[in-house]
Image: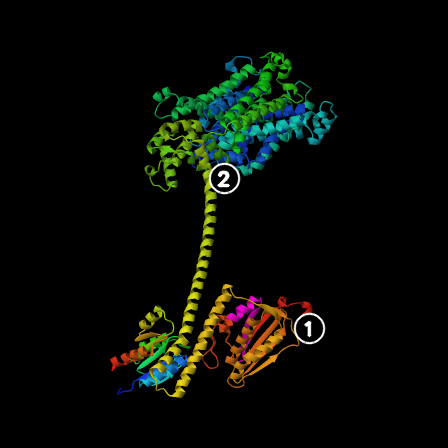
Amino acid sequence: MLSSSVIVGASFAYLVVLFGVALYGDRRADAGRSLIANPWVYALSLAVYCTAWTYYGSVGRAATTGLGFLPVYLGPTLVMGVSWLVLLKMVRISKAYRITSIADFIASRYGKSRLLASMVTLFAVIGIVPYIALQLKAVSSEYGLLTGAHPGTSGDWYRDTALYMALVLAAFTMIFGTRHLDATERHEGMVAAIAFESIVKLVAFLAVGVVVTYFIFDGWEDLFVRAAIAPDLAPLLSLDMAGSKADWFALTVLSALAFLMLPRQFQIAVVENVDERHLKRATWLFPLYLLLINIFVLPIALGGMLRFPADVIDPDSFVLTLPLAEGYSTLTLLAFIGGLSAATSMVIVETIALSTMVCNDLVMPLLLSSQRFRRWAPHDLTGLLLLIRRGAIVVILLLGYLYFRLAGQAYALVSIGLISFAAVVQFAPALLGGMYWRGATRNGAVAGLTAGFCVWLYTLLLPSFAKSGWLPMTFVDSGMFGIELLMPERLFGFGDVNATTHALFWSMLANIGAFVTVSLWRPPTAVEAGQASVFVDILKREPRGAARFWRGQAKIDDLLALLARFLGAERVRTNFLAYAHSQGVEQIEDLEADGHLVHFAETLLAGAIGSVSARVMIASVVQEETLGLEEVMNILDEASQVRAYSRELEEKSQALQAATEDLRAANERLKELDRVKDDFMSSVTHELRTPLTSIRAFSEMLLDDPKIDLAERKRFLGIIVEETERLTRLVNQVLDLAKIESGHAQWHETDVDLIELINHVATTAGQLVRNRQAELTLELPVSVPVLRVDRDRLIQVLTNLIGNAARFVPDEGGVVRVVLSESEVGVRVDVCDNGPGIPQEVQSEIFEKFRQASGSGGKPTGTGLGLPISRQIVEQFGGRLWVTSRPGEGAVFSFELPRKLAVSTGESDAQG
Amino acid sequence: MTQSKKILIADDEPNIVISLEFLMKREGFQVSVAGDGEEAIAKIRSESPDLVLLDVMMPKKSGFDVCQEVKGDPALSATRILMLTAKGRDTEMAKGLALGADAYMTKPFSTKDLVDQVKQLLGSDA
């Protein structure tokens, strides 16, 4: 036994230390050097999850179910494993919109619904108050156990330690939870104290574990060997006692969801989170904490069972009774302080969270919407707000105490831990669904919550009341109205699992079923759709996206005055000024009172009074247009539309550019064609006028002057005839070319033997060569394939080439060679001269119309159309005509006609 | 016709040169001939003709280039230039006159008109 004065003294000293830590944390925060801006503190403060219920209760559960205590810790471990998926999103949303509680979060998601806010608050209070009572009971009964006093349900209330503890905790919570009204609803000192408490309870529990395992017993092996041979304990070492797989699964899911939904967890993990990067460290640090605090659970349980006769000592108190029985009084005291820290941390955070919810989501919306309140309300509402919070803290703690006094040792209190879990888990479908499903509606959330809560009430809370003797047990044993199908713990005959699993199954079925069905019933309203997009897309979208859904008119002065009533004028001006600077404006007055500013003001206010109340207050000072669903959808679509539109625009502009390119090219081609035609006309004109000039001049001179002597006269007439011939040739060739080019030329295809044809041309065109005193030689094979071509046209080509060659051979020793051969392609003809050759740069030009190379006489005498026409003819038959020449070495004009023109391959083979 | 004026015929068409030469000689002018633009320039410098019958489309150097060079050279600027071209477009004529040609005639020309034009150009000078 320990004397009560020692315990009370130690407890009081502990609370003073706690007070000191909290005060230090707040001081540091005020000085701008945050103590909790540290991932270690964040991870430790998350351990508020481990309450007195787990501190003492885990050993108790292990003593009856072996490893059955584990799922309660597996759930949170799993959640932390995927914290980047769920928790990060919750943190991000809450930071962006200054969410102050889980009720605020859910209400905000569904269009800042007052109904939802108050429902969640109410359910949370109903679900959590007994849980607080459990903490008071734990401390009070362990105190009684140590001092030998009778646990607190009997005796005068004013001598009850639990009451004083409740009051001390209320004071602590009031001091550190409502020290001032903060726009971020963060409590640095409190968080520091919670982290400190987490260390204390861990150290205490580990100390007990080590002493029990290594000092009272001889280590793990000793314990387990002894347990294995004890008939009562052996089953604990297997999984047989740990419950069915369904129960394990259900308990894991339950604790995982509760870890996210418990108001205190939401407060610590989300609201008090300083930096979302801390989540990363907590992802492994928090599970490590859970591992450490659980490592000695089984040894202590086994130790207690081995040490004490069965059923004499409640296994829940082994943590204290084992060291006490073995005379470790200091350790016992430490263990008690550990339990105290587990209890106080839970009570403090839970009370802060609940009081915030009660104030922001229950009381304030009611007050603010009351006309009477608006009339008598003081201008500065900060005091009133704090008063409400403090009142709520006291009321909640007293409710907890009251429940503890009423329920006492009853079953309702003992099993309340899991019952509480099951209560808050009802928030999960609405909260998680709302974070990932745009289609979730307010009505769906209300329906789901109601259905789930009712089933919870019926299958879990009422039976626990019945077992406490407050309701007839027949209700549990034979169902409501004696209908077996309605037996609360065997609903519709499903009852091969434990009560918690049963309740979780049915409540979740009802909750999710109602939530989904009702959500699908009607499409979301405009406000819901807007909030849905903001919540669902938080990781993709910049937080101020919500401002897009606001249309209306506001005055900065009105907003400033409104916010000042809740936050104090100075704080509001500071915040607005910072906002102004972020907008690139010097003065608050220069700010534009647009949707962004209103949204900023509302968020700022929401941090203090919750988003529901903030919405009500902002709506009272600005003129707003109600957006239709279609408009909201339009805004939502806008972003994607803008993206699609810009992509479309880009495509169009590219298409346009391509089209412009095409047009320009086409235009260039047309211009080129125009220029070519122009050039052609100009050239034709020139070529026609030149012979005409001579003809006219000589004719006039002959006409004017009859005295011109005969020789002269003859010479002039000769020139006239020559020029007339040139003119005729030109006209014919122009017409010829025009016909070929336009496709109107007539082609008379006959079987042509090129050997015969070349021989024929040699006789007619040979005269041209001989006129230049040059020699024409023919190099012909024995036979070549007979081709089906236009004979006259080929003669025209050959004559042209031989005539050209003749013009360019030197005056003396000129030679023109015609070579016929078979090539890869077909039949090839080369016309070679030993003239000056053609410079590389003009080789392609000479195939253009009216472009002539200078002949040996200096002046070309052709029409400038021979080669273009020849090329056209050869190409008409699928062949090609080209020139190879090096200056000084003569020129070779060659053309090839493809083999496919051959009349028959057999014939050519026979001839070859 | 007391003094005998000198005329240079610059054209690459032999038959046209023959006719012009005959025509100018019949009118009592001294005549020299150039077959391309470069030769024309050389002869203008060496023989200082009073007038040049200048064809536009000539090898090596076009009539326009020759005209420009002559009119741009103060020593030669007194040389009269009568441009002859087989390209009858207005732009050609405008270009020739802009370059400083004294007159411009299109081929085929009336021999009588040509002689009149030549006399007029030389007469005003005399």
Looking at the image, is A763 positioned above or below residue A187?
below
Mark yes or no: residue A14 visible.
Answer: no
**Residues at marks 2 and 1 on the same chain:** yes
Tell me which chain the residue with mark 1 is part of. Answer: A
The image position of residue A74, as x and y in percent, is 62, 31
In the rendered view, tell whether residue A94 sits above or below residue A723: above
Which one is in front, B4 or A81? B4
- Given contact means CB atoms under 8 Å apart, are the residues at marks 2 and 1 in contact? no
Q: Which quadrant, please, contains the N terminus of chain A?
A: top right
Which x, y percent locates residue A790?
A: 57, 69
Which sits earlier in the primary sequence, circle 2 or circle 1?
Answer: 2
Q: Position of residue A496 (x, y in %)?
A: 67, 21
User: Which residue is at the front of the view, A490 or A262?
Assistant: A490
Could you classify mark 2 by the number of other residues whose Cα lies within 10 Å: few (under 14), some (14-19), or many (20 or more)? few
Q: Quadrant of residue A498?
A: top right
Residue assigned mark 1: A911
Quarter holding residue A598: top left
User: Dot 1 surroundings within 10 Å: few (below 14), some, or many (20 or more)?
Assistant: few
Q: Position of residue A195 (x, y in %)?
A: 52, 32
Q: Chain of mark 2?
A: A
Q: Which amino acid, mark 2?
A: Lys
- Tell me which amino acid carries mark 1: Gln
Residue at left offset 69%, top offset 30%? A218
Q: CA distance from mark 2 to mark 1?
A: 83 Å
Count of residue discs = 2
Magenta stretch: give its range. A869-892
Residue drawn 47% across the image and 54% down it: A658
Figure quadrant of the C terminus of chain A = bottom right
Q: Can the viewer see residue A831? A: yes
User: Which one is nearer the viewer's eye here, A567 or A632?
Assistant: A632
Q: Which mark is residue A540?
A: 2
Magenta stretch contains residue A814: no
